Amino acid sequence: MIAINHLSGPLAGKTQTFDDNKEKIEFGRESDCDVVYPTEETLVGRRHFALVRELDDWLLHLHEGPHGAHFVSVKPALAEPDQPIESGSVFHLGRNDGPSFEVKFDQPVLAGDVKETVSQEKVTPARVLVRRLTIAGGAVAAVLAVAVGGWTAYYMKHEREVAATVASLSQDQRNEKDAMKQMSAAAAATIDQSVIDRARNATFLVVMEDAQGRKFGVGTAWAIGTDVLATNAHIAGLCDENFPVADRELAECNDLKPGEKLSVLQPGPKGATYAVVRHSFHPGYIAFPKFVLGQDPAYIASFRGGAPREITGYGYDVGLLQIDGRLPSGLPLEIASKDEILGLKPGMPLASAGFPYENVSGSEVLALAATPQVHYGNITALTDFLFLPTDPAHSYLVQHSIPETGGGSGSPILGPSGHIIAINNAGTFGPKGEWSDRGAPSGVEINYAQRVDIVSDLVAGRAQTAFDDDKPYWAGQMANFKRGIDVIGDWVLDRARPNAKSIAQLASATSGGLEANDMRVDPDTKKKERVNVETLNLSAGVSYFIFVYADHQAPISIYLKDSNNQTLASSTNSQWYPSLSFQPANSGSWSLVIIGPDDDTSYTTKVYSWQTSGS
């Protein structure tokens, strides 16, 4: 017989017993469960978990809820799927201080003078281990399952030794997704439901309406004041995503077309709509990438000669939406204190509410009546906006495992205290696929949020001052990287090397620019462009490599012409670092024609000659 002794919660003091022929004991709030909790006890799922008998063992079966597996702890640890249960085990549901009970197994009645079996060493049965591996879903699990199935007789004889081996392999190959579910369950149990309810009520859908009255959700915002909501700069700024932020000015970020409107929709079946009458965003959203890029982008050289990787600088992605009217009282969410923010640590549990819609079923109706989605996760890392480790004062980028896709931008992220600690702004996505222009959310579950004190600076009117104060720090961090002309120049030279023994020797280096008086109209395309001509003195029989690098990544083309204006070599790939190779038959002067857009553009021209090693 199995007995359930309720220790705490609404069933405290009660004992329920079940006969030995009972095969499954279901726990939950549904009326047909074996152990039924009151409907108002929301820490317990509708069908929270079950104890299932397999041969002589009782195993724990976890049930999935809307946020992953329901929280079940078997003192003192979080429960695992198909975990064998011992008599005297104490369970907690929902969270570590949730409703609890003790499970007792009565010893069977023994016939005659047969003595009771002594306590045995606990070994997880091989069949349970195989099931765990199968649930994990990995290729190794499948192989092990087949192997175990084929060696049944051997396991019957040597179960203890084999089970230990398989358990070791199982631990090594544990599926990361299952681990994330366990962490999410722990996060869900740590953050009180009342906090989640407040966050859901204060989270609004940002809606764009075109001139024809058609509406579409574009992101998430949350109440931070009586008539102000916080969101991301890339939502509040109304910046065209096809126009790089680093190329813009603050005044240019307002891409609403005539007749278009922006509003926010309160969640719920009868949610009110509030017109947005003013939008603003942190000046660092545009100033920071400009600062990082400077005259010349920063790069990291790739391993074994791959294309250099540009260091992007997109931070301070926070903004505000002011509405026409006042929000219901008590709605604004509380921002974490400075001490709480500086005390953030990797591993801390998080919760968020928002409106992810990209490739999500039912997202088409969000603009009619908005239902926020609640997700849980953990802080995975804390870095600065250049993804570099730093001190707590500059750990502005909160990396986390909360699921993310389009529409979740601007979602509030709450810590264990229930205070807002960050605002969601970006995710990690895999390769582009047929169903998504930017790829599916990556299984690595590393997404990004802006720490909330950046929002506080914007609300208090000190955003520009705070950014200016940060500039010396960013200048110091940029010293970790090389500028593009050095990294890309070396990479282009390496790819152009005639053979392994060739060495590039710099013959000349000059600086120039495309200015307003260099403008002309292309007779074929009718486009305005700027043209400059440099004279190069080259020697007969020498192999030259000519490299031109434009600042601000301006697309330029180069042509090498003779005295008769005949093109001898060219590079027209419209990159900002075109190059060409040339070996003149005679010594003399040649014209290098540089063509670029109708904008002020500075450039550097480097001419190399190839020498043979050892000569």
Image (cartoon, rainbow, N blue to C red):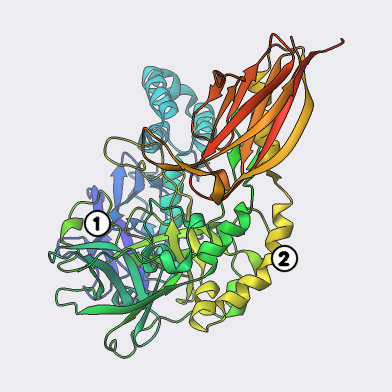
Q: Tell me where residue 453 appears, x and y as whole percent.
A: 55, 74
Kindly identify the amino acid type of the residue bearing the numbered disc 1: Glu
Is residue 59 shown left or right of residue 471? left
Q: Tell me where residue 550 appears, x and y as whole percent.
A: 60, 41
Q: List the residue tagged with mark 2.
A: 472
Q: Residue furthest front?
A: 564
Classify mark 2: helix, strand or loop: helix
Which residue occupies the foreground of this view, 446 or 407? 407
Q: Which mark is residue 26?
A: 1
Q: Above or below — where is 587 with respect to 175?
A: above
Q: Above or below — where is 249 with respect to 576?
A: below
Which residue occupies the foreground of this view, 509 or 304? 509
Tag 1: Cα neighbours inside 10 Å, few (<14), some, or many (≥20)?
some
Q: Nearer the viewer, mark 1 or mark 2?
A: 2
Residues at circles 1 and 2 in contact by the CB criterion of under 8 Å: no
Q: Tell me where residue 534 appears, x and y as whole percent.
A: 66, 33
Kindly identify the amino acid type of the residue bearing the numbered disc 2: Pro
Q: Quadrant of residue 540?
A: top right
Which residue occupies the foreground of this view, 218 or 149? 218
Residue visible at 24% across and 51% down in the picture = 360
Q: Above or below — where is 334 with respect to 449?
A: below
The quadrant in which the N terminus is found is bottom left
Q: Residue furthest right?
A: 614
The quadrant in which the C terminus is found is top right
Question: Is residue 585 visible to the viewer in this orientation of the structure?
Answer: yes
Q: Quadrant of residue 488?
A: top right
Residue visible at 24% across and 56% down in the picture = 26
Is residue 48 shown left or right of residue 550? left
Classify mark 1: helix, strand or loop: strand
Q: Tell me where residue 214 appears, x and y as whole percent.
A: 14, 63
